[in-house]
Structure formats: structure tokens, C-alpha cells
Amino acid sequence: MNKKLFLLCILITSIAITGCWDSIEIDDRTFIMALGIDVYKPTEEEKNIEDEKKYLPQHTRPPVSLTYVASKPISAGGEVEIANITMSSVSHSSFTAKRQMISRSDNELFLGHLKAVVLGDELVKNPMLFRETMDRIEKDPLISRRISMAVADGTAKEALEIETELEKNIGKFISSLFIRQERSNRAPVADAGDILTTLHKNGNVLIPRLVYSDKEIKIGGAAVIKDYKMEGWIGEMESLAYMIITNNLMTTALNHNMDDLIIPYTLTEIKTNIEAEKEGDNIKVVLSVIGEGDIDGLYFNPEEDVLDPSFVKKVQDGICKDIQKLIIEAIKVFQKDYQIDIFQFGDYFRKYKPDVWRDIEKDWEEIFTELEVVVETDIFMRRVGLSR
Amino acid sequence: MFSNNDKISPSQIANVLVLMMLGTGILTLPRTLTEAAATDWWIVLIIGGLGITLIAIAQAYIVKSFPGKSYMEIISATLSKPVAYIYIIFLVLFLIILNGFLVRILAEVVKMFLLLATPLEVIILSLLLVIVYLVRQGIEALGRLAELLLPIILVLSLVLVALTIGNSDYTNLLPVFQISFTDVVKALPVVLFSFLGFEFVLIFGTYVNKTNELTKYTGGAVLVILFLYIILNLATILTFGTVQITHLIWPTLSLFKTIEFPGLFIENVEALVMALWVIIVFMSIAPVLLAKVVLLTDLIKGKEFNYLALPLIPLIYFVSLVGDNLAEAYMLLDMFTLYAATIVAFIFPTLILIAMLVKKKLKREGSTSE
């Protein structure tokens, strides 16, 4: 009996003390909501400080500067106010910066609730730094694969230090910007998991662009990554076309220009089917875009009748041409300027035409730039509003 | 009176076997399978799974033919006594090493996701002590625990998998039927090793009270695992695609990292997943220790076995710390399963089966000639 009791004691203590090494009280944790990663650029002043010299480039690659944004509730006279706390640290790798940061903070920095990662455009232009950063995000057991990612047009530090007026918590603000993007589609919305998956395929991906001013942040356009290196930006319209082609578009509002009239319309549903065929040496991709939407407005007391089917037909045909032009031009940008198959046409061949893919896989990059792409659009305007 | 008669029902042993098999393959199977067979993983998985079902049924048949006999007695009866002694010693060593590796991998995962600052040794030891506590009570407690835990594990994992459907891409399953016959054969070992654990029916079979139903339940256990593996692989491939999977060390765990609850009351389900995973691995390690204890008792012809459980712990502990790092531990485990597990799970049981059938035939011929 005594022996059993003894064993039980050992068991209970060994189980009970196991957690001790890792116990951190919740108010000792600082929850990082957003993370900004930049290439470190010392200011003139810093360059002259002897101490700071050790942070200056010793390797061929520059050190990185990390910006952590944590929101901390501060109770002032019973009212709880959320303050954004930003901290920055310089390191030779984005992996070690967190360790360095801990020595400057009274709390444990906790990345488990991270919402957004913003990369400075300078960093994305350096392939090695970019790959390091992406690897960190993929390797970290705490960081979720569903966080939002964006490339700042400028530095991530500046972008994250902005005090937005609508929502004080910047991490939450950026990630909800992404959710709202699904309704306007001016940037190729993807979470970190999607970006990593695409990047694994061939090193090419689009990452949404974050533009900031004094008081505002917006997501629009995208950074084009080719071979883990940022090659340039694409605008909002190219992003829109990309979303249509990759079948990610939910809804969007556009204007159609018809005989000096500006007709605003909303696309409520749009689907793209890819068909590809190979005849001899000629490879052809056919995109058929089918969608529907509403005409939002015309002008007061119009001469045209919106209930006249032939008028609606005319608008419809015009919109079809608009969308067709939009898509063809976006494809041209990637075929001629960037020469990367960002639309994953290659993936289509791999999945649906594996026999053809085996022949063309090797030269796909070249073939893509010369690829014949036919776009067929079929868009219906279903509703016209309340007045005629 | 009847509280500990050391008998379990066929359904209980099926539960034990399901949990054992689950623990070995669940973490890495999606990666190794995709590496070996790309989008045609399901062909390989189904062929391999059905093959294992047949092998498991054959092994259960061996046990059925010797009702109430222990593994050592079965070997003595078919392949002579010296072979039995040598093989059981080999088997015990095999199980100690296997146990060590399983514990190590569990501890590494727990350390990475949950207890970042806790020393690996403490995680391993505290787990082993809990296992000893269970094993000292024998097969009956184990069977009951397995029966209790399996439904919980099944329901929870299916719910978790269902939550990942939201961001799946069905074109990730294409193209199909691209694999050649030789590639299927080459990829089969990956599947076979992920089902390891079924061979324990040979060791635990002696405790089953209705031996005539054993074949049915053993085959059923393998089919349940096949079903679970198909669901799990499907979910991982749909979410990640074949390229991304090969870059993930534990695709199954990464899969659950993609789940996000919109309601935010529980943001990451990792804690839930880890709890589930600890239970699964606990239930795949405990039977291995029990098997060792049972075999050792047979070897020294002891009556009670519970005092043997604790002295084995230091051995397992040292084996578990053999690899200097995760990469080495995995490499050693792979080599170990390739050679030793093939003997234990496939070659030796086949020898027993052949010897058994030959003896039966000789006996029949003997009786007809009389």
C-alpha cells in the first residue's frame, strides 16, 4: 500500500510540475497584433554612434528591422482605451530579433494571435531576405497560416505607426481591410497560407500592396514577385483582372463609358472557365467569363429607356467588351512585362492535360510569353434599379 | 472477483489496434505518400490498406488456430522452442527501440507546440510514468481505456477535418491515373509502414475471450484506419496541394493551423489538436510497453507481470534520446522500421503461418493414412 502511495506521489508531482517551465501569466504576455519587417537603414546620426556600428552591414546583405505592434488596454478612469504600442528592433535575421526584443520588454512577446504581417518593399526586392522572412512565417509553430500579408509601398514601420481613426488596433484594422477587400477586389486577396503555397510552386506570387498616407491605410494593387524577388507593382485594375481570371472575384462595382454616358454597374457574380488546347505546335488558352450584375444608375429623366431590352443589350455588350479588354491587357502585362505565369495556366495543363504538360513543362516560361489567349465574355445585366 | 481476469473482448482489441496504428502514421503519412505517389496517392493507399487488411486477417487467423495460447507458445508449437526464445528476445529489443522513438517524436511535437521551455527529458519521463501506471493494470484496463477514447478521438478529428473544407481546392486532386505500376510498387512500403501496429494482434490475441470473432474485428480495425487515413489525406491534399505538402514536416498539424474560427472565442484550435494528439500517441505507446512486459513474463515464465513495467522505463528513456536532433531521430526511425519492422510485422508471422499450415497438412495426411 505504502509503495503504491509513493508511486502515486511521484506521478502526481511529476505531472503537476511539468508545466512550470512554460507558465506565463496572461497579463505578462504582450500580444503582438501586427509585424512589420524592413531592411534596416541607419540614419546619419546612428551611423556615427560607435555602439550602433555593430548593427551596420557586416555581411553582403543588410540587417533587418522588425516592428512589433501590440495593443494594450489602458484603463483611464474606468474607461478602457486601447493604445497601440510599436517597438522596433534591428537584427541580422528576422529570427533573432524577437529574442533581442525580449530583453527590452517587461513582458513576453507572444505571436500566437498575430493578425497581419507587413513587408517593406525594399525587403521584398532582396530575394534572400524575402525567402528568410517567408520561411520564418511557415516554420513558426505559433503563427497561423491565415494571417494577412501585404507589401508596404514604403516601409512597414511607417505604415504600422499610423494611427488610423476608424480602428485603433492596427493589426485588426489591416486584417479587416482584407476581409472588406473581398467586396471591392482591388487587390489580390490571399492569406499567408495561400501565398506560401503559390510561392512553393515556382517562386512567383502576387502580394497585396498597402498604401499609406498620414492618417489612412489602404489595400490596392499588388507587388509582383518573380523568383522570390519583387519586380514591380501592378495597379488596381490589373489586380481586378487577376481576381476575375483566378475565379476569386466576389463582387465589384465599375463604370461603363457609353456614348458620353457614364453608366455605373455592379458585378454580383462572375465565373471564369479555362479551356486549353494544343493543335500541333500552337497552344491556345480560352477563358470564358460568365457573369451577371445590375445597372446602378443612368441620369435623371433619361432619353433612353432602361426597360427597353435592346438598350440593356447595348449596355451589356459594351460591358462585355470592357471586361474582355481589361483581362486581355492584364494578361499582356504578365506575358510581356513580367513574363511570369501568375494565372497558373501551367497548373491547368498539369492538372487537366498531363500529357501535353509533360511535353511543354520544360519550356513553359517561354511558351507562356507567346501563349495565345482568347477571352470570351458573357455578362448579363439583370436589374436596373427603381426608376426608368 | 471478476475485476481483473485479463480477458478482453474482440471489439476492445480492435479499438486498441486502431489507436496503435493511428499513432504511427498520422503525422507524416500525407507528406511521405505525396512524395511517393503525388496525386495518385489514393490508389496506393487503397491497395496498401486492403493488402494490410488481408495480412492482419491472416495473423488473426494464426491466433484463432491456437486459442488461449501466448505468442511464445504459438512460435514454440510451429517453429520449435529455440527459435521462440531467440525471436522473443529480438522482439523485446525491437519493442524497446520502437517505444523509444515513438516517445521521442511525441515529446518533440509537444515541445514545439505546447511546452516550449520544458526540457525534453521531463516531458518524456512524465509521459512514461503515466504509461507505467496504466500498463501495471494489464490488458483489461488498456482495452477499456481504448474503447472509451476511440469514439472521442474519431468524432473530434472528423469535426476538425470538416472545418478545413472551407479553404479546399478540389482541382488539387488532378491529374489522376498518372502513376505507373512500378511506381505503385515502390510507393507501397510507405503505406505498409503507416499501418504498423496491426501485428500486435499476435501478442494480445491470447487475452481475447471470443477468439472465433477475432479475424473479423482485426480486419475491421485496419479498414477503420484506412478510412481515417483516406479522409485525412484528402483534407490535407485539398488544402495544400501536392507541392506545399512536401515542404511541411507534419502536414496534419499544419492542416489544423489553417482553421480559423470566425467567432474568435477560440482563435486557434491548436490546443485542441495537441490534446487529441497526446491521447492518440499515449494510446499507441502504452500497448507497446504492455506487449514488452507480456513477452518478458512469458520468457521468464513468470506469473505476474506488473513489476516488470517500471524497470523497462530507463531503457526506453535512453533509447528515446539516441538521435541528436529531430532529423537524426527520424532517419534512425525510418531505417529501423524498414529492416526490423519488416521482419516483425511481415516476414516472421508469414513463417509461422506457413509452418502452421504445413503441420496441419502433415497431421491430416497422418490421420488419413492411419
Image (cartoon, coloured by chain):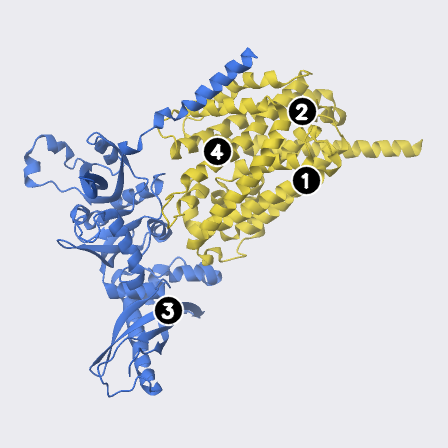
Q: Which residue is mark 2?
A: B3
Q: CA distance from mark 2 to mark 4?
A: 28 Å
Identify which amino acid the numbered label 2 is placed on: Ser
Q: Is residue A325 left or right of residue B306?
A: left
Query: Disc 4 to disc 1, how far (Cα)?
Result: 25 Å
> What amino acid is at disc 1?
Tyr
Q: Which residue is mark 1?
A: B217
Q: Quadrant of residue A113?
A: top left
Q: CA distance from mark 3 to mark 2?
A: 66 Å
Which of the 4 image quadrants contains residue A267? bottom left
Q: Specify the colour of chain B.
A: yellow
Q: Mark 2 or mark 1, which is nearer the start of the sequence? A: 2
Question: Depth-wise, is mark 3 or mark 2 nearer the camera?
Answer: 2
Callout 3: 10 Å neighbours few (<14), some, many (20+)? some
Q: Residues within 10 Å of mark 4 (few under 14, many from 20)?
A: some
Residue at 81 percent of width and 33 percent of height: B360
Q: Chain of mark 1?
A: B
3D distance between C-alphas at marks 3 and 4: 45 Å
Which residue is labeled 3 in the image? A269
Measure the C-alpha gap from mark 3 to mark 1: 51 Å
Residue A347 visible (yes or no): yes
Task: State the hue of chain A.
Answer: blue
Locate residue B335, reporting x and y percent: 52, 32
